[in-house]
Image: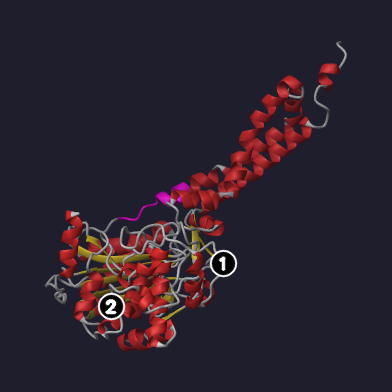
Amino acid sequence: MLIRILSLILVALPVSPTRYEPTTRPPIDPAAIDTVVREYRDATGIPGVAVAVTHGGTVVHVAGYGRTGNGESVTDRTVLAVASVSKSITALAVMQLVDAGRVRLDEPVGAYLPEFVMADARAARITVRQLLNHTSGMSDTTYRSFSGPRLHTLQEAVASMRSAGLAADPGSRYEYHNPNYQVAARLVEVLSGMSFDSYLRARVFGPLGMADSRTGNTSNDLPASGRGHLVIAGQAIAVPEPPAFGNGSGGVLSTAHDVARWLIAQNGQGTMVVSAAALAEMHRAQAGSYALGWNTGRTRGGAPLIDHDGTMLTFTAYQALLPATGHGIAVMANTRTGATASDIGYALVDLVEGRPPTPPSRSAMWVDLVMLGLIPPAIVLTVRGVRRSRRWADRHRTRRRLLIAVMRLAPYSLPILLLATLDRVASFLYRGRDITWLQTAYLVPSFVLLLAALATTCGVLLTTRLWRLTRHRPGAADAAPCR
């Protein structure tokens, strides 16, 4: 109770506008940035990366490395997905409405968006702030945003929540849930009278000079350059992003050139599209370490860090603000497996703070090699088992040994069952997060390949032995004359 009272006092205190001023630390050498990215690409097989680094109101470095999924070179103007980094942009759009007096953060969402109705009566108490800091009580455990019906618009997304309940009282706990930001984006649409994409182009992207930025509703809206990859054992394989709806929560498409302008504005420099007080509110920790579309924390050196990552199944993104130095960092990578944009981003944070960057890890590559290396032995053992199945069946065909035979065959069904229920197992491991079977396969491709091989080989062996067992009626061997 004491903690809650203190929290209320802190929230009630006036927020002083924060304008980050860069320190006198020497600017980063762009060649050093190139070296970090090159080392990560060489060690992990990341096919394409785009990077933006800013200092105060200055662009230090923007560049693209490698290739896109359609084979083109990645440049600072290549349009890539920023995934959940989009949440900070959605939060800013809402804060613009707060600045204009159109929205109050602590008013119920329903006061501005009557179409937002849920099956749980407690949903009427959800505030705009609780959407933005993920304390609304909404959860993947009560609303299946990925495995549910296909959605195409923000209006459909909000309408689909009518039959959903809450997992907790609004404001009682933090739980990251993408639909929170889909509701927030729909609120922007309704109050502005514009589509969310049009609003951002007119009020955010346009004023900041982000000419190549836009939003998409589903993975079908990804441009040709937006085809990502799976990296297996260091080899990049271009694959389509699995179907999903993500506008508001993860639908922004942008470039390194444009994101640099975004970082400058978020550090309180250059063109301001939101008030300094609203910017400070977005960066203030409110639900644990989560702010409004941003996370708050510390760097390895102990300095304040405001950041957020983004993950799709074939893309990752990362953005960071370092208030102590006035730097901004953004990374976009067209893969999720092997290494991510966050890995490179953390290394660049080290570089900014004068530490040796965290070296890339090859552990994912070795795990993939071990997984894939187990497939040939499984096939060899299966062939051997099939060849010996007749002899095996002869030993177990009597009534007395038939039960033992069935018990010995039962474990062979486990890989098949695990493969069939992989999405449910993944959801359990991710504490109830909604996930489809295909998304799980994208998350751990080498494991799924091994599991599919084991399910196939075990299925062949299981079928062969059962067929051998049932060729003759049980008990026939007992009735055979003694010799």
Q: Secondary structure at mark 2?
A: loop
Q: Classify 51 as above or below 135.
A: below
* Quadrant containing the N terminus in the rendered view: bottom left
Write down the residue under mark 2: 104
Crowding near pointer 2: few (<14 within 10 Å), some, many (20+)?
A: some
Say if the magenta span includes residue 365.
yes
The residue mark sitting in front, 2 or 1, is: 2
Q: Classify 28 as above or below 59.
A: above
**Disc 2 to disc 1, how far (Cα)?**
32 Å
Q: How is the image coloured?
A: secondary structure
Q: In x, y percent, where is residue 2?
A: 16, 54
Q: Looking at the rendering, which quadrant does residue 418 occupy? A: top right
Left or right: 66 with respect to 373?
Answer: left
**Residues rendered magenta in the picture:** 359-367
* Amino acid type for the residue under numbered disc 2: Arg
Q: In x, y percent, where is residue 420?
A: 60, 49
* Amino acid type for the residue under numbered disc 1: Pro
Q: Classify 233 as above or below 127.
A: above
Q: Are marks 2 and 1 in contact (CB under 8 Å)?
A: no
Q: Which of the two residues, 20 or 287, is positioned nearer the viewer here?
A: 287
Left or right: 311 with respect to 372?
Answer: left
Q: Classify 134 as above or below 272.
A: above
Question: Who comes first in sequence, dot 2 or dot 1?
Answer: 2
Q: Secondary structure at mark 1?
A: loop
Left or right: 419 with respect to 31?
Answer: right
Write down the residue under mark 1: 149
Say if the magenta span includes residue 167.
no
Q: Residue furthest front?
A: 121
Residue 118 visible in rendering = yes
Q: In x, y percent, where is residue 28?
A: 22, 70
Q: Residue at x 75, y 27 (%)?
A: 393
